[in-house]
Amino acid sequence: MSDNPSVTPPGPPTSSGPPTSPGQPAPRPPLQTADRLLSLLQSFDRDRPEWGVSDVAREFGLDKSVAQRLLAALAYRGFLVSDPQTRRYRLGPAVWHLARGWERDGGLATLVMPALQRLAAETGASALFAVPDGIHMRCVAAADGVHGPLRVHGLTGELYPAHAGATSRAYFGMLPPDDRAALLYSRPMASFSERTLTDPAALEERFAEVRRSGYAYSEGEYDPETAALAASVAVGRRAVGTLSVVGSLDALRPRHQELVAPLLRSATEIGRLLTPRRPRPHLPERTT
């Protein structure tokens, strides 16, 4: 019991996460305040990019004073920024610095590499994971197929133009049409081979194929000697990157259809890896 009679000792932390297995209690967060801060930070996403004090209090079952302190703490460290007019909060620059460091310093590559290695071993083709970078897709991790490296230089760091090849098409095909048009069709598009498409109408037909089939296949659009089979990797309903298997034209062309199933399975696996655990907000029981 506390030596200070005016202070109520904290009770055991509550858990809002799912049970680890049927019949077992859910894991408890080690620090309730830290768990609340992180849960609140995870609540800022594309569907709900702004939160106000009243929103947080209602969603998390908190007093407004507590909600205000949580938001202010995150804003103080730069994880949130407050609009002085609306008094609503959005993600701040500290989030960008963390995300950029995680990706650029190898955290993302380390996370997805086991899945890439399994896919390469299963298909015999090189496997790569790429993320959007302006009007390109940038390879952040790759695993060699049975024939070794596809090129003398590694695939990691390679930039794939948005309009050329399956690795890019599998992602850009999932964007809303207006977003895609603003990125692709407002500037000249280079031709890398006789198979590269630069006509917007023809490209839109290829992007529509991606949405219908769930994957993209290309031959020699970016690298004249290479074929690629790719699928988008999604977190929730939003594409965040692409998973590809690539190889020489002669090696990939006759068997690319049989590689679709393992590719899609692996894309789903990586999507799960990239999906943060988001427990439901704990709403305390109300007494009457």
Image (spheres, helix red, strand yellow):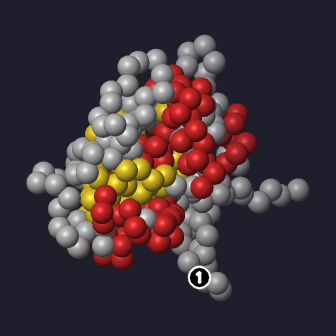
For this orientation, the residue located farthest to the top is 85
Amino acid bearing label 1? Ser
Residue name at image x 60 percent, y 13 percent: 85
Residue name at image x 60 percent, y 60 percent: 279
Residue name at image x 49 percent, y 39 percent: 172
Residue name at image x 30 percent, y 66 percent: 251
**How many callouts does the rendering have?**
1
Q: Position of residue 52 (x, y in %)?
A: 64, 31
Q: Which residue is mark 1?
A: 21
Q: Is residue 181 visible to us here?
A: yes
Task: Give above or below for 61 relative to 10.
Answer: above
Q: Position of residue 283 (x, y in %)?
A: 71, 55
For this orientation, the residue located farthest to the left is 152
Q: Is residue 37 visible to us here?
A: no
**Residue closer to the observer: 153 or 233:** 153
Q: Position of residue 171 (x, y in %)?
A: 48, 44
For this orientation, the residue located farthest to the right is 288
Left/right of residue 156 with respect to residue 135 in the rendered view: left
Q: Position of residue 119 (x, y in %)?
A: 36, 70
Task: Give above or below for 90 relative to 44.
Answer: above
Q: Residues within 10 Å of mark 1 (few under 14, many from 20)?
A: few
Which picture quadrant has residue 255? bottom left
